[in-house]
Image (cartoon, grey):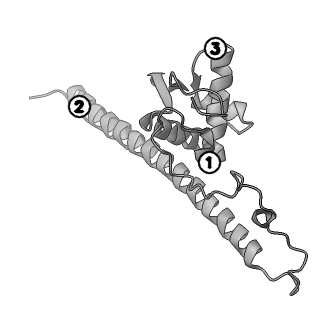
């Protein structure tokens, strides 16, 4: 017959395993929630911008100048760049194909490479960008960095540490 202390230890171990499993699941859900909240906020901002553009200006459109009507080439601001689309990097691909968020990450890592400093973590990137280093912000940056690793823009030499891929340099030409 098993001892009472032995039975208590078995139940304690089972409870600890369950708590650990639930904590891991909660962490995963928290990270997913942070990414979803950021995406939702981006859509709210986009909707507000569209509302502002489509709002009537008291019926007057005479003094509104179309920057493309001046005959100049379209600027990178004119290009539509969905935030979730990151093209696969190839020789000669310019940074301007990326949204501003991704360009900021590349610029920070290019500065580190230029100064011969090591890779950055997403928490360090958040602090560098002036963001609070809270899990939601860090996970949003991690999601972007992982996407850039998958598309060949960044390398992850150690888990959670990111650097530019050899060949990706400077915002001008991308190579």
Query: Closer to the N terminus: mark 1 or mark 2?
Result: 2
What's the distance in space between the residues labelled 1 and 3, CA to CA? Answer: 25 Å
What's the distance in space between the residues labelled 1 and 2, CA to CA? Answer: 53 Å
Residue where numbered disc 3 is placed: 117
Q: Residue 99 got which mark?
A: 1
In this rendering, is residue 127 above or below 66? above
Q: Name, please, the residue furthest toward the left.
A: 1
> Which residue occupies 55% across, 49% down?
34
Q: Nearer the viewer, mark 1 or mark 3?
A: 1
Report helix, strand or loop for mark 1. loop
* Quarter where residue 94 is shown: top right
Q: Residue 10 got which mark?
A: 2
From the viewer's perspective, is 120 left or right of 69?
Answer: left
| Residue 63, horizontal then vertical, whole percent | 91, 75
Q: Nearer the viewer, residue 45 or 64?
A: 64
| Residue 42, horizontal then vertical, whole percent | 63, 58
Q: Nearer the viewer, mark 2 or mark 3?
A: 3
Q: Name, please, the residue furthest toward the top.
A: 116
> Which residue occupies 66% across, 70% down?
47
| Residue 54, horizontal then vertical, whole percent | 73, 78
């Amino acid at each position: 017959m098993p001892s009472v202390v032995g039975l208590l230890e078995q139940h304690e171990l089972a409870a600890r395993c369950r708590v650990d499993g639930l904590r891991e699941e909660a962490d995963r859900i928290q990270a997913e929630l942070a990414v979803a909240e950021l995406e939702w906020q981006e859509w709210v901002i986009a909707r507000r911008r569209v509302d502002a553009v489509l709002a009537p200006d008291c019926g007057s459109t005479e003094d509104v100048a179309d920057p493309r009507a001046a005959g100049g080439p379209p600027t990178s601001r004119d290009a539509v760049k969905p935030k979730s689309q990151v093209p696969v990097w190839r020789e000669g691909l310019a940074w301007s194909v990326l949204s501003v968020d991704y360009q900021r990450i590349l610029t920070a890592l290019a500065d580190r490479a230029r100064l011969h400093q090591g890779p950055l973590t997403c928490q360090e990137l958040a602090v560098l960008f002036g963001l609070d280093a809270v899990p939601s912000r860090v996970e949003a940056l991690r999601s972007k960095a992982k996407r850039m690793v998958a598309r060949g823009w960044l390398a992850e030499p150690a888990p959670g540490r990111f650097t530019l891929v050899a060949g990706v340099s400077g915002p001008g030409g991308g190579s």
